[in-house]
Amino acid sequence: MIHDATPAIEVKGLECHFDDRAVLEDVSFRVSPGEIFFIIGGSGCGKTTLLRNMVGLIRPGKGEVRFNGRPFTDADTANRRSMLKTFGMLFQSGALWTSLTLSQNVALPLEEYTKLPADEIRNIATFKLAQVGLTGFEEHYPSELSGGMRKRAGLARALALDPSIVFFDEPSAGLDPVTARQMDDLIVQIRDTFGTTIVIVSHDVESIFGIADRVIMLDREKHGIIAEGKPAELVAPGGDPRVLEFLTRRPARAV
Amino acid sequence: MPASLESTSARATSRTEGTLLDVALEGPWRLDGETPRWTELVSGARPASVRISADRVSHWDTSLVAFLGEAQRWCTDSGVPCDTSRLPQKMRVLSRQFESALRTCGHDDHSQSLVVEVGLSTRYFGRQMRKFLGFVGECWIDTVRLVTGKAGLRWPDCLAEMQRCGAMALPIVSLISFLVGVTLAYSGSIVLKRFGGEIWVADLIGVAMTREMGALMAAVVLSGRTGAAFAAEIGSMKANEEIDALSTLGISPIRFLVMPRVLALGLMMPLLAMYANCLGILGGMAVSYLTLDIPPAAYWVEMLTIVTVQDVAVGLIKAVVFGIIVGITGCLRGLEAERNASGVGNAATSAVVTAILLIIVADAIFAILFNAIGL
């Protein structure tokens, strides 16, 4: 609120190589606080790689990532830990810890980062699970749940510490259309409630038009961003044919 | 002055106005900071009504929601009206969600009485036994099909397994069986020295290695090395739905995964046992020469006076059975592993424990059996 000009996330000149193969070259963009920001593109374009670079699972070959103006890429361990605390990540298949119950899964970040008493942690875990619609499943193990429920539980865990930024890796992949829409509604609700900044890697066209504030599209050949803007702007006549083809699911010529 | 605001912590102050408890919340409410709890604030008080306001809260997150939720639950439980009209809309909605989540949650006690526990364990044990016997039966059927030529075996897989569980286990088997020979020689010589019969160390080691220790040591090493690996490998294949992929193709996982492994172990174990026999005898020979002054030639001649082909055969027959036991338990535990990370770990542990248990049981049965038929 105080520094409106500071972007929540800033990626500058990011490069990533696997061995000699370039995946991303000179990728730069900014995400404003409270924005729902989509990273889209075809399979193998480096969407997930970009996300993994942003959250620090991969160290970028070049360039840097800043959160709320603080450099993340070269931060020391203590700084890094304090920044990691402020974001949550929902992995593609939930990535719940299979030996823990849902309640314990959500409680673990709270136990690690807060000094709250055990019963309050349990109450908060119950509340977070209720927020994603998993009331009554607190004592279930991840193996007893469907894919969609596992994903929602993963989201409850990502939200445990009230993060200011939440990253989603393919939130609607493997979900039926109804569940996928509920997931979208949930994402919007989270943003509206806590002003959370949301970064989503996806290729679900309906979600993009449904909830995205802004989109960047990556391309496999270019190893970088080929389009940036609001979803409606990207499909406006005269746009990049690759983007039109992706977003309208029709070959470029037919448009 | 944001800095000074941040430095103060979350506070909840209560004032009593007649029968009304007026609670004012202020400061930054953060999960990772110190926050007051409703139960401490209200302890002992019996207000007729409660009013909560949060006008001077500078920052809030779930910690505040948790406080309000608990407050509302307390009020509902003790029938006290709670006035939240001065709270922002979002706080009211979230705290109501928090309260209803606590009411409907499914935290329940899973502990059982002793009788129920014993009953459940017995039933579990019975099921496990049936599963094991069923699995052995399936392996048997596939073996018959293989022998009668009705089904093929993937020989390249089998050869690769033979290399992994046989040739690659040589160093560890060498070391262990050599040391077993050394240990036997030392402990045997303590007794035999009293009778002036150190030379009989050769007899002791010859018989002990060929009949018992060679096969037993090879089997124990392989259950830890290969049995656990089978269980972990097949267990993670199961977690990854690879076993299901085989089944939907109509390929029996037993024929495809279990047979090559069990066969490889059944063929390799006698070879490893034979090798272990030689190394154990060598270990005994070395100790005899160095500490008892028995020349290797005398040791060898003495040993041949008692060790017969039958002794070696007894060891090798056991080795084949031990090999099959290690293979079957490893594969069975892998196939029945739970589909998660800890399931794979448990499968590996359980494979080793089951294999060693069954090996010792089988060894005892063999001892009785061979004694009865005079081998």
Image: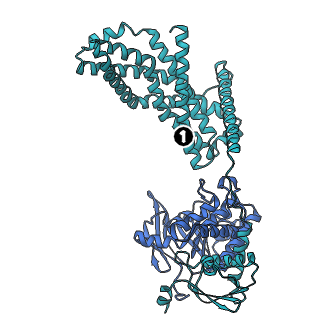
Chain colours: A blue, B cyan
Residue B121 pos. (x, y %): 67, 40
Residue B26, relative to residue A61: is it above or below?
below
Left or right, A172 with respect to A165, comes to right
Residue A129, relative to residue B254: is it above or below?
below
Give me the chain letter of mark 1: B
SS type, badge 1: helix
The front one of B214 and B70 is B70
The front one of B296 and B75 is B75
Residue B233 pos. (x, y %): 55, 40
Examine the rendering and report whether any part of residue B111 can be seen: yes
Q: Amino acid at mark 1?
A: Ala
Q: Quadrant of residue A145?
A: bottom right
Residue A238 pos. (x, y %): 66, 77
Residue A246 pos. (x, y %): 67, 67
The front one of B70 and B79 is B79
Q: Pointer 1: residues within 10 angstroms few (<14), some, or many (20+)?
A: many
What residue does disc 1 label?
Answer: B348
Left or right, A157 with respect to B275, comes to right
Q: Quadrant of residue A237?
A: bottom right
Residue A212, relative to residue B54: is it above or below?
above
Residue B200, relative to residue A227: is it above or below?
above
Examine the rendering and report whether any part of residue A236 can be seen: no
Left or right, A224 with respect to B138, comes to left
Q: Residue at x 50, y 86 (%)?
A: B8
